[in-house]
Amino acid sequence: MPTADTPGASGPAGSTVPETLFLSTIPGASPSKWVERFTSRERRVQLVNHDDGAQVAFLAPGPGGSAPRGLPQVGYLRWRLDSSPEALLGAAGVDPEDVHVVRFYEEDPVVCVGQDHLLAAWDVEADGPLPASELDPSEAMDPVRFAPEPPADPLDAPELPGSGERTAVEIVATGAGHVVLPASVARMFGRRDVVVLPLTRDTTHPGWGVGLAWLRAVDSQLVQDFIGAAKGRRPGSSRNDHLRDAPSEAAPAGRVRAGSGAARPGPPGKTASGTQGARSVKGARSGKGARGGRGGRRR
């Protein structure tokens, strides 16, 4: 018999204890529209905000090769378009056959330079995106250099997610060097004293693909309903039925149409957050929820 401790069970005075989906995010991710579609009295989302370097941690085997703990249940993946999510997983010691990946959208590369940098004078309207050949490799700032070591437990978010990218942007703001970032990340850490220029896509900077991933071993109706919400459907929709039959079916890579539930970058200086019912781990531990705006049209 269900108890008050059972997810989705009725608690005292007929209250409902919601099932919680733990969602691993990365800098630039804005899952608010997806979360709004998914969240209800019975279900909620708790965000675990990680750096790019720890985005595969929740999929990796446990200590000594033991089974993963299964939390977070689902999370963002970002990979270079001259590679693949399977290559990203393999490099992290995760068997791609153990993971479902659904591709959602692509991100353009941009370069951030200080206002006094020579490239700040580039006229995008007249000359178009900046060719990667104009960048001096010796001036490149790699955010990985400034990022902390990934936490051992995928439920332990860093004190300041995205600190590597944030530090790189702060350095280039002084006029020293440049940093190439996904457009959403550049907007997240944008500053008035930093100029952001679009780059041409080539073999040097091909852009990134973004998707959601989860372990086949922890697949569940909760996960499937969230994937359905990310695809634009409300939980319980009859159109979610095919997900239960073919959960590994991937959406074709490419730009997501407006209203499709894609994560979109927020304005400069804003961090990714969920809507009502979504909380970061840090906020949950302090008793404070992370609120976001209403996104998407209700269906």
Image (spheres, rainbow, N blue to C red):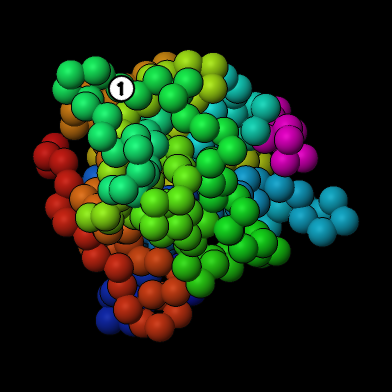
Q: Position of residue 136 (x, y in %)?
A: 52, 32
Whether residue 193 is situated above or below residue 216 in the rendered picture: below
Q: Which residue is at the front of the view, 158 or 6?
A: 158
Q: Residue at x 67, y 35 (%)?
A: 89
Query: Is 252 on the left or on the right of 247, as rendered?
Result: left
Residue 228 shows in this picture: no
Q: Residue at x 40, y 66 (%)?
A: 280
Tell me the amino acid under the disc marked 1. Answer: Pro
Q: Which residue is at the front of the view, 177 or 100?
A: 177
Q: Read off the magenta span.
A: 89-97
Q: Position of residue 73 (x, y in %)?
A: 54, 50
Whether residue 7 is situated above or below residue 84 in the rendered picture: below
Q: Which residue is at the front of the view, 87 or 48?
A: 87
Whether residue 237 is situated above or below residue 164 in the rendered picture: above
Residue 57 shows in this picture: yes
Residue 275 figure quarter: bottom left
- What crowding class fits label 1: few (fewer than 14 Cα within 10 Å), some (14-19), or many (20 or more)? some
Q: Residue at x 26, y 34 (%)?
A: 121
Q: Which residue is mark 1?
A: 129
Q: Position of residue 13 (x, y in %)?
A: 28, 81
Query: Is 94 on the left or on the right of 29, as rendered?
Result: right
**Label 1's element?**
loop
Query: Is 63 on the left or on the right of 31, as rendered?
Result: right
Residue 93 figure quarter: top right
Query: Is 247 on the left or on the right of 217, as rendered?
Result: left
Taking the magenta stretch, the answer to whether it contains residue 188 is no
Q: Residue at x 48, y 16 (%)?
A: 202
- Quadrant placement of the C terminus: top left
